[in-house]
Image: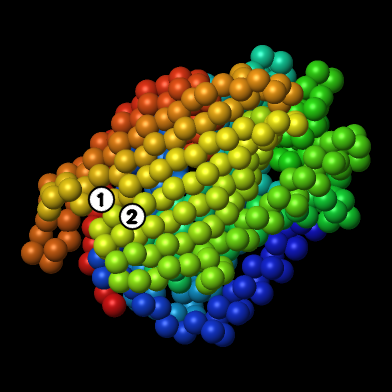
């Protein structure tokens, strides 16, 4: 996708140049936390949640070391080129790969741009993908959308970190912008075929990307899952009805610009005891797409609340959902917790065409116990997460059937230099 990549490079380069000219100093919060998930459910390396969390902690920690030891402009350049050539495709392709791994399908992530300007997940024969399409269409569609799902959820994590004051915006700004631009490039720019070169499948099926163009492929298979199987879908392959759905996707993706990290008016209340921020988001899912309205509340500098309303839509029917999280609440000097609940009404059997709905939900509890602390006030906690969900789709949770999961990790708390 050479032209798409060029457009992406141009946009992110403009952002980088602006950052270099405007921001010459970076102020850090004093104490930073870096959670790492050692084992998630299913116990296969790596789930989408596990890779995203570990990536973001590593990125944040290394960025702090970079800015503590080198000039600020040099730090921006290192972040920029790392993002451009490795980090963005790495997490995007791992999103795709995580779904295959959860389904016990072996694959190879190749997160480096080839001569066509594309990164791949490969190593899966046509027969395996065709079997999945014919027998488990929601998971097959999710193979297409999971890279963008991963980008979307990483942005959600960054918004929480910055708004709740757990991390500096300037540390995560380039990563956040890169993913926003990537989502825009896939969804909105895909409406303009002159920007998207036609893809040709490699002769060796094991060298082919698992899905080709994420958005075109997802839309084609939602509407026509029974046609003869092929991977690489181009703009010209889409029917009139599918092109109308592409316009819906491309236009709704602009909602991702309504971010409190972009638009100061979305930080609507700033008082001593309460701060409130609003935002919106959009991405595709296994049965269509969804829109989020996010509400972030900090009360009394103690309670960090993230609530959201979600509207799913399949072919023609809307379904509702929502959730609420209490994030990083200090129970005592030794214990912290994060509690989250999600409820949804989704299409029955995650079907694209039905108007029948199916109720579901999920609950998640994370407990952190600080068991190591030194004289410098650096510390480490051991983390235990418990999750139950009914049948249904929950972003970043790779299992869509009913599932009870356990995860174990650690959090390293470090005093960073100013």
- What residue occupies the far left of the structure in this picture? 375
Q: Taking the image as drawn, is residue 171 in sight?
A: no
Q: In whole angstroms, how far apart are the C-alphas of marks 2 and 1?
A: 7 Å
**In the displayed structure image, the side of residue 163 where residue 279 appears, left or right:** right
In which quarter of the view is residue 31 placed? Answer: bottom left
Residue 367 place in picture, x, y as percent: 24, 40
Helix or strand or loop: what does disc 1 sit on?
strand
> Would you name the residue on which mark 2 appears?
304
In this rendered view, identify the residue nearer to me: 359 or 206: 359
In this rendered view, identify the residue nearer to me: 138 or 371: 138
- Residue at 39 percent across and 57 percent down: it is 297
> Would you name the residue on which mark 1 appears?
329
- Residue at 56 percent across and 61 percent down: it is 259
Q: Taking the image as drawn, is residue 273 in sight?
A: yes
Instruction: Identify whether 233 is placed above or below 254.
Output: above
Instruction: Identify whether 347 is placed above or below 370.
Output: above
């Amino acid at each position: 996708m050479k032209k798409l990549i060029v457009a992406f490079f141009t946009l992110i380069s403009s952002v980088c140049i602006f950052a270099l000219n405007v921001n010459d100093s970076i102020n850090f919060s004093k104490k930073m936390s870096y959670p790492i998930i050692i084992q998630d459910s299913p116990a296969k390396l790596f789930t989408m949640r596990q890779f995203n969390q570990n990536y973001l902690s590593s990125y944040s920690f290394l960025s702090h070391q970079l800015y503590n030891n080198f000039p600020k402009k040099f730090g921006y350049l290192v972040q920029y080129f790392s993002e451009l050539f490795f980090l963005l495709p790495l997490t995007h392709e791992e999103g795709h790969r995580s779904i295959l791994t959860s389904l016990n399908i072996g694959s190879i992530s190749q997160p480096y741009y080839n001569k066509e300007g594309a990164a791949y997940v490969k190593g899966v024969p046509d027969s395996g993908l065709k079997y999945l399409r014919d027998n488990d269409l929601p998971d097959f569609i999710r193979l297409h959308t999971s890279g963008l799902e991963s980008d979307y959820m990483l942005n959600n994590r960054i918004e929480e970190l910055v708004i709740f004051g757990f991390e500096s915006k300037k540390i995560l700004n380039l990563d956040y912008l890169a993913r926003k631009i990537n989502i825009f490039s896939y969804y909105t720019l895909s409406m303009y075929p002159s920007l998207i070169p036609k893809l040709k499948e490699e002769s060796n099926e094991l060298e082919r990307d698992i899905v080709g163009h994420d958005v075109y492929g997802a839309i084609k298979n939602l509407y026509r899952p029974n046609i003869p199987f092929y991977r690489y879908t181009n703009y010209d392959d889409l029917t009139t009805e599918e092109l109308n759905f592409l316009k819906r996707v491309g236009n709704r993706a602009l909602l991702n610009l309504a971010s409190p990290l972009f638009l100061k008016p979305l930080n609507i209340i700033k008082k001593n005891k309460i701060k409130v921020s609003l935002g919106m988001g959009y991405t595709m899912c296994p049965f269509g797409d969804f829109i989020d309205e996010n509400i972030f509340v900090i009360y009394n500098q103690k309670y960090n609340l993230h609530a959201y309303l979600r509207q799913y839509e399949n072919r023609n029917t809307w379904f509702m959902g929502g959730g609420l999280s209490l994030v990083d609440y200090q129970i005592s000097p030794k214990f912290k917790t994060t509690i989250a609940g999600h409820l949804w009404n989704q299409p029955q059997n995650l079907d694209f065409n039905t108007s029948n709905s199916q109720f579901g939900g999920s609950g998640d509890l994370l407990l952190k116990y600080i068991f190591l602390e030194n004289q410098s006030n650096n510390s480490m906690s051991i983390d235990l997460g418990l999750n139950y969900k009914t049948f249904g789709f929950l972003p970043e949770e790779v299992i869509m059937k009913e599932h009870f999961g356990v995860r174990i990790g650690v959090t390293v708390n470090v005093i960073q230099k100013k």
